[in-house]
Amino acid sequence: MARAVAAPTAGDMVMIGLPASRLTFSALLGYLFPAFAMIFGAWLGSLSDGSDGATALGAMAGFLGALAIARIAIGLVPDLMPAPRLITSSPHSNLSQQEFHHERYSNH
């Protein structure tokens, strides 16, 4: 029988887990594809007119086109966007936990 896991509440330590199998492809689709499309669009813009304005418009068109293609691809193939999972960690776990304090400590 599966053990029931309670939902985390405010103040609980949690970790966010992402499946590694889709994370690399999602990063390529979200970061490298728009960057390369922007460079390709700038190249096409410079070939068409040769002016700085045409190059800039080509770069913007390439970037926005890549974002549109990525949005459509994620809509058609929902597994491209990995769903994060919240993993509650118990105080007795072996996982390293780091907590950031945003307080100033004064030396007395």
Image: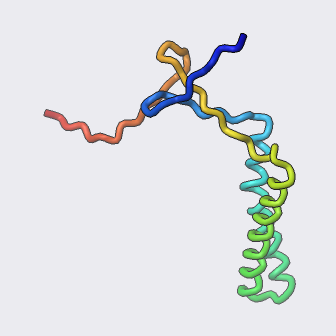
Toward the viewer: 60 or 88? Answer: 88
Residue 101 point in image, percent of width and height: 36, 37
Query: Which residue is situated farthest in the left direction here?
Result: 108
Toward the viewer: 3 or 33? Answer: 3
Q: Is residue 13 left or right of residue 86?
A: left
Toward the viewer: 41 or 11? Answer: 11
Q: Does residue 40 lie above or below 91 as drawn?
A: below
The residue located at (75%, 34%) in the rendering is: 20
Q: Does residue 67 lie above or below 31 as drawn?
A: below
Q: Does residue 95 lie above or below 76 as drawn?
A: above
In terms of image quadrants, where is residue 25? top right
The residue located at (72%, 55%) in the rendering is: 31
Residue 108 point in image, percent of width and height: 13, 33
Toward the viewer: 34 or 73? Answer: 73
Residue 67 point in image, percent of width and height: 76, 64
Q: Quadrant of the N terminus?
A: top right
